[in-house]
Image (cartoon, rainbow, N blue to C red):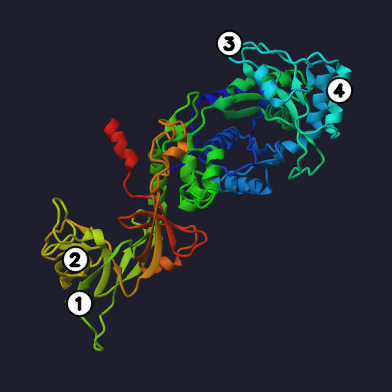
Amino acid sequence: MTDTPADSDFIRDRVRRDIEQGRNGGRVQTRFPPEPNGYLHIGHAKAITVDFGTAEDFGGICNLRLDDTNPDTEETEYFESILADIAWLGFHPAAVLHASDYFGQLYAWAEYLVEHGLAYVDDQDTETISAQRGGFGKPGVDSPFRDRPVAENLDLLRRMRDGEFADGARVLRARIDMNHENMALRDPVMYRIRHSHHFRTGDDWCIYPTYDWAHGQSDAIEGVTHSICTLEFDTHRPLYDWYLERLPLPGDRPQQIEFARLELTHTITSKRRLARLVADGTVDGWDDPRMPTLRGLRRRGYPSRAIRAFCREIGTTRTNSRQNIEALESYVRRELNATVQRRMAVLRPLRLVIDNWPSDASGNPVVEYFEVANNPENEADGTRQVAFSGELLIESEDFAEVPPPKFFRLSPGREVRLRGAYLVTATSMEKDASGTVTAVHATYDPATRGGDAPDGRKVKSTMHWVSAAHGVSITAALYDRLFTAAVPGEATGEPLDDLNPTSRELLEGCVAEASLADVEPGQVVQFERLGYFAHDSEQRLLFHRTVGLRDEWAAIQRRQG
């Protein structure tokens, strides 16, 4: 799988045209501006790929700028997690900046707008201001404080800054047009009073800029040329430009460009709802492998390279759409197939006793070793030795006392191949008091070492196995969709109504070949015939199923074709 830039899309076409026209001196600078109030998710991965990828494609730079303008919800923990997640995805900011770096300049520019009659202090509460904005087709109502004299506005703003007023007592608003067809331009709030401790600036400030006031001006201060953001900010672009057109900027004005955000089926990316899943214990934390957070996907074993390739392949558009999660899984599967080693593991063990297996002079079962390829897709990964003896463990579903139609695995009188070892034939079985099969007895053909019969006879099934005496006990976590509906909440309006109560199955008492004990934390391996599994980063010998072996996306495409 390659991780190459898209040849063309509307964003790159725009940047290419700007370079050709000599705008910004041919310079390209972008930024990724998350708020440090939560963990990054798969939707952010798309934005990161676009922001950093666009800069890389044109030899430019991309900064990380934390939008830390709301002290009530932001924490150092989130800031540190954002840095780690971006690095894991494989991107490196040219600089790590904060909107709070510019609080002084933003405030100075606010006074500049007040002095030019373009902003005013409003004494009304939030609810009243919201009601007065009107709606689509409904005119707004001017604030009774809209025509305050400049000197009075400036005095009140400075007293707001100095902490004289309580939270919510006053706000600073831009003076634009309360009847504008674009609701974002109906005298938007620029500053609100928050007597809250900021994780970086401490108690230096008690008024904080809104996103719309901080964002474009921060872009301009940093020298951003192309401010790329998701489509929900489309209606905010006129406000972005309005502020920049009226300020004495240090350089060229940045341009805002919007693209459709990434949405996946069976997935939500609302921070508020994800936080609720964590708070009520539906998931085990922000890094639960069922979560769409980057740290959850990482813990589950998703390769960052596969995520980047997926985001690049789906490209950028101006139309919102929902991508099939199976498409992302297909990228994950292809990347893992090419790069990870194979191991044998049995998740629901059933004893297989080979009655004619030889014993040594002391009466102990002979132990043989088979050389098995670590990854048939990559010869450089070499081989490993796997122990084989007279008592094995197989998957319980690989045996049927009364086989259904088209069942080609082990059943009484049927011969099958044990992966890389011998052909065996089931002869009898043991059952417990409830009638459940607890062991299968079989014979092996010594002439079939390596799995092929010298007389050329064929079998229809090859099964994996683990030597009972040489296996290591593991725990396997199997995952289904976290949400049962393809579009969570589509039917009810509340996505959490579509939670899947059986999204995880934890299997203890699984057994794997001994070499699995040497797998590093976080490493992904393929359990032959079962799927790809990631060794947990903290709990030893806990393995999370990343994806299965079957390419569901390919099947979907065939059906649609």
- Is residue 263 visible in the rendered image? The answer is yes
Q: Which residue is mark 3?
A: 137
Instruction: Give the secondary structure at mark 3.
Output: loop
Q: Which residue is mark 2?
A: 435
Instruction: Give the secondary structure at mark 1.
Output: loop
Label 3, label 4: how far apart the Cα atoms are: 33 Å
The crowd level at tag 3 (other Cα within 10 Å; few <14, some 14-19, many 20+) is few
Q: Which residue is mark 1?
A: 357
Q: Please tell me whether residue 9 is drawn above or below residue 485 in the rendered image.
A: above
Quadrant into which the N terminus falls: top left
Q: Nearer the viewer, mark 3 or mark 4?
A: 3
Which residue corresponds to the image point at 66% horizontal and 27% vertical from the top-left? 225
Which amino acid is tagged 3?
Answer: Gly
Label 1, label 4: how far apart the Cα atoms are: 94 Å
Contact, CB < 8 Å: mark 1 with mark 4?
no
Which amino acid is tagged 4?
Answer: Leu
Q: Quadrant of residue 26?
A: top right
Depth order, front residue of 127/253: 127
Which x, y percent locates residue 232? Answer: 56, 26
Q: Residue furthest bottom?
A: 362
